[in-house]
Amino acid sequence: MLLVNNSPALELARSGAPLAGTVTFHGGLATPTPADAKNIKGRVLVMHGADDPFVPPPEVQAFKDEMKNAGVKMKFVSYPHAVHAFTNPAAGNDNSKGAAYNADADKASWAEFEKFLKVTL
């Protein structure tokens, strides 16, 4: 099974669910129990807007440390000039609102997702 979602997908993976892979597009990364990362069974792909104000750099670094410390096979891709909701055209195009569509990040993240599927499944 492969799970694609945002924060709930990561929490399900942290629970030890038998997932071949977990993917998140512009999702939250924080968890109240970072030690649970040791339960992750499959690969993790995170696609993140580099300028996302809802997921600040300390949260990103804590997540990366969590995955590294647990030995999770994880790839983290950060898209420059992208904020939260960068794959959603309905989010508009005003980055100052914190959520906005970014066509370049959308296209690149989808290509990354397709590569992940080929490797994981």
Image (cartoon, helix red, strand yellow):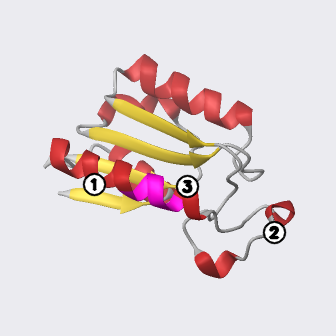
Mark 3–mark 1 CB contact (< 8 Å): no
SS assignment at label 1 = helix
Q: How many residues crowd around disc 3 within 10 Å: few (fewer than 14), some, or many (20 or more)?
A: many
Tell me which residue sits at (69%, 47%) in the image. Answer: 55
Identify the residue under disc 3. Answer: 105
Residue sticking out furthest to the front: 104
Q: Earlier in the sequence, mark 3 or mark 1?
A: 3
Mark 3 belongs to which amino acid?
Ala
Residues 72 and 80: in front is: 80
Tell me which residue sits at (74%, 71%) in the image. Answer: 93
> Residue 94 bears which disc, if any?
2
In three-dimensional space, the C-alpha distance between marks 3 and 1, rounded to whole angstroms, equals 14 Å
Identify the residue under disc 1. Answer: 114
Residues 3 and 119: in front is: 119
SS assignment at label 3 = helix
Q: Earlier in the sequence, mark 1 or mark 2?
A: 2
Residue 34, image x and y in percent?
A: 51, 32
In three-dimensional space, the C-alpha distance between marks 1 and 2, rounded to whole angstroms, equals 28 Å
